[in-house]
Image (cartoon, grey):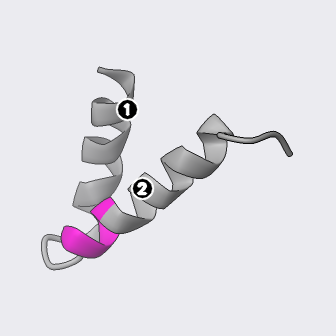
Amino acid sequence: MWNGEPHTVARMKMQAFMRKNRKNGPRFSEPVCFRRFRA
């Protein structure tokens, strides 16, 4: 909706992170991603 939407950036970062950690498993990437965003 507005320029520099935080949700869009977070989604793009999550997708890239999941793709990199796809070998480890999506289940393992999910908690790690959430922890990084919350930290």
Disc 2: CA contacts within 10 A as few (<14), some (14-19) or many (>=20): some
Which residue is farthest left?
A: 24
The answer to whether mark 1 and mark 2 are in CB contact below 8 A is yes
Measuring from the top left, give residue 28's x and y in whole percent. 23, 57
Residue, x 30% and y 32% (percent of image)?
Answer: 35
Quadrant into which the C terminus falls: top left
Name which quarter of the figure residue 31 lies in. Answer: top left
Is 27 in front, or is 20?
Answer: 20
Q: CA distance from mark 1 to mark 2?
A: 9 Å
Residue, x 86% and y 46% (percent of image)?
Answer: 1
Range of the magenta residues?
A: 17-21
Which label belongs to residue 37? 1
Q: What amino acid is at disc 2?
A: Met
Q: Which residue is mark 2?
A: 14
Residue, x 43% and y 65% (percent of image)?
Answer: 15
Measuring from the top left, give residue 23's x and y in whole percent. 15, 79
